Image (tube, coloured by chain):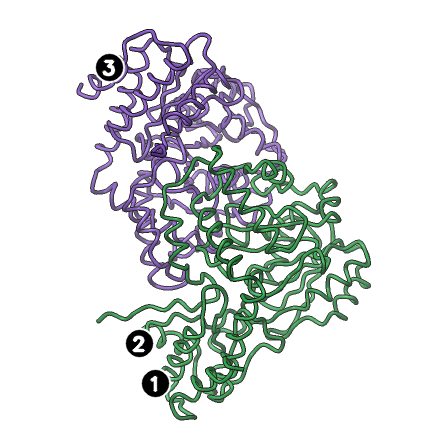
Chain colours: A purple, B green
Amino acid sequence: MPLKHYLLTPGPTPVPERVALAMAHPIPHHRAPAFEALFAEVRDGLKWLYDTKSDVLTFACSGTGAMEGSIVNFFKPGDEIVTVNGGKFGERWGKIGKAYGLTVHELKVEWGKAVDPAAVEKALRDHPTARAVCVQASESSTGVAHPVREIAQITGRGEALCIVDAVSALGAMPLPMDEWGIDVLVTGSQKALMLPPGLAFGAASEKAWKRNETATLPRFYFDWKREREMQRKNQTAWTPSISLLMGLAEVIRWLRELTLPAVYERHERLARASRAAMTAIGCKLYAERPVVSLTTVWAPEGIDSDKLVKTLKTKYGVTLVGGQDAAKGKIFRIAHLGYFDDLDIVVAVAAIERALADLGYKAKPFGTGVGAAMAAMGE
Amino acid sequence: MPLKHYLLTPGPTPVPERVALAMAHPIPHHRAPAFEALFAEVRDGLKWLYDTKSDVLTFACSGTGAMEGSIVNFFKPGDEIVTVNGGKFGERWGKIGKAYGLTVHELKVEWGKAVDPAAVEKALRDHPTARAVCVQASESSTGVAHPVREIAQITGRGEALCIVDAVSALGAMPLPMDEWGIDVLVTGSQKALMLPPGLAFGAASEKAWKRNETATLPRFYFDWKREREMQRKNQTAWTPSISLLMGLAEVIRWLRELTLPAVYERHERLARASRAAMTAIGCKLYAERPVVSLTTVWAPEGIDSDKLVKTLKTKYGVTLVGGQDAAKGKIFRIAHLGYFDDLDIVVAVAAIERALADLGYKAKPFGTGVGAAMAAMGE
């Protein structure tokens, strides 16, 4: 029998059957009332997810397009920004900023660690004219949750905007935009929102919209002001990704049925179980301030994590991801965001136990990790 | 019984069942071999569709994103471009160019007419340092086919690039990029490629890639050079729209089975039938040099075309589109690109005959248009 396949990665994440089927329906025309009703429902749901009174705008692009939008709509050439670079996605802020002629002050953070809010405060003291702090709520290359709430408190006392990439965080953990004072919050479809990639979202606070009035960086496809005008009429400036929006409406209906507290609790339970399992089999956790969306783990001494990932894939049909850049070959990442349940973690842990044994590592009897995960689930 | 719905618009166009089902399958991870095999197949198919040796790049965005890419990757601030503005999409070239600080020379063309190649030649004589001519192969707001082949011959003699938006043309008519000497050719997924919106494509000639080396307009998400490097490795720089790419692979397989000459012939047959039908019921055609993808028609004297479109929708379940901007209320547009067959045109014409009668216009006995369409199909 060919291997059954298990997609257990932190994006794309598995698409629930009811969502896949919703997207297989015939699509409406995007300038027709049927689309407008669908989009009104989606817009309302996104505000609920973001816990904000601001408009949450939808874009046909990947998360990187929304990150670019969160830069080009709020600054002038030469503006200074502080970027938190503690991983592959944190590094991206700097690349975008430089591509558009901003002066980027990078706050480097060791991979696997979270930024210290005091370091953000110091960066803003060192660069008092900095116009923003850009940070990840979940740095998926390291599995770290940066202290977004504390950073927003700091920026809230001055002129800098707090710009947050929550691509692998929003929908997995509470990120109440208005209450925390986040100024720009972006996310994507293929993580906790349980959709294929291709949609991204962004919202801006009043402080950010005020900044938009004087922002002169060039933009067209990612012009948020034009989008806001159109989307308030339940339309989009450019042709929207209609089938993904049909799926998103179904996702939002389902999340409302589940309720957000229950969704967040499930993410926490799966994170707890994964960490208990890895610790039980003698693996060290990688992230110091781990995000609820994924668990990053050091491969045992002498084992190349890329080889582990390959064994998982070819022998057990389990797709996990290894480390990128600084963490390449050293870590592996267990995802638990979106359409994941307890037994997915059992599958992941069992496959990891077996694959590690295949590679010569077997510190504990088989089932040690799975048992620890199951015990942690019941807590 | 609720109305059955017929999507008969020039984008989005109907998605074939086999394509919708292909997209409902579980998605692979985009950094995994299964994705790379899929993407290699898609890349090969796109080169075949474009009839080019150049790489055809794929982007997660709508067609407008590919239009923006075809500007920001090839110019410096202050560069002059000539844009052909004979409709809503031609106008967009100028808006994008201005947003990025180019000097735009607009060649205005009356709505419903095609640009005269001699006018393009004159514009290039008047602006000898112009770096490009931007034009639509199919201006879907008017239903006009601009003479792209002749324009490419003109630009081929000098330094200007020939940049062509073929969003509603590619796949419906031959556009052999290399043979015609088109320098930049962009298209989208939701027209003749029979997919939902959300993917766009772009290819550049050697002349254009040479220009890319000195192009300094800012870009990040739409950086074609970075994409070319990645896509040659069957990867994308940013997370791709995986489910739509799964659909595209299925579309390409189907187009190969059908063969392109047969696909183009079908588009011509449907265009011929639509035009015969409208003429037979006494309606005047709008476009002087009509594109094969759609038929644009003047509403009869005294009839508001928006009212006609509304009647078609609410009473007959048929979604057609009316006119935009200068043509608003005056014209309606019958689409025949993508997943359309003879009987779709019969449906469209029959509904138009009935809706026109509802609005007080009935010059000919019922069936006159349908009969003329059927006769033209058999020619």
Which residue is depicted at the point 21% across and 38% down?
A258
Which quadrant: the N terminus of chain A? top left
To the question of a shared chain for discs 1 and 3, the answer is no
Disc with the residue nearer the chain's start (1 vs 2): 2
The residue tagged with tag 2: helix, strand or loop?
helix
Q: Amino acid at mark 1?
A: Asp
What residue would you read off at disc 3? A372
Q: Nearer the viewer, residue A252 or A283?
A: A283
The residue tagged with tag 1: helix, strand or loop?
helix
To the question of a shared chain for discs 2 and 3, the answer is no
Q: Is residue B260 left or right of residue B315?
A: right
Picture disc at residue B358 = 1
Q: Residue furthest left?
A: A378
Q: Is residue A308 left or right of residue A174?
A: right
Q: Position of residue A131 (x, y in %)?
A: 53, 31
What residue would you read off at disc 2? B315
The residue tagged with tag 3: helix, strand or loop?
helix
Q: Is residue B360 above or below residue B262?
A: below
Q: Amino acid at mark 2?
A: Lys
Which quadrant: the C terminus of chain A? top left
Q: Is residue A19 above or below residue A358?
A: below
Q: Position of residue B221 (x, y in %)?
A: 56, 40
Q: Quadrant of residue B320?
A: bottom left
Q: Is residue A302 left or right of residue B163?
A: left
Chain for disc number 1: B
Q: Nearer the viewer, residue B172 or A161?
A: B172
In 3D space, how far apart are the residues under numbered discs 1 and 2 (Cα atoms)?
10 Å
Labels 1 & 3 near each other (Cβ < 8 A): no
- Mark 2: few, some, or many residues within 10 Å (few <14, many ≥20)? few
Chain for disc number 3: A
Tell me if residue A146 can be seen.
no
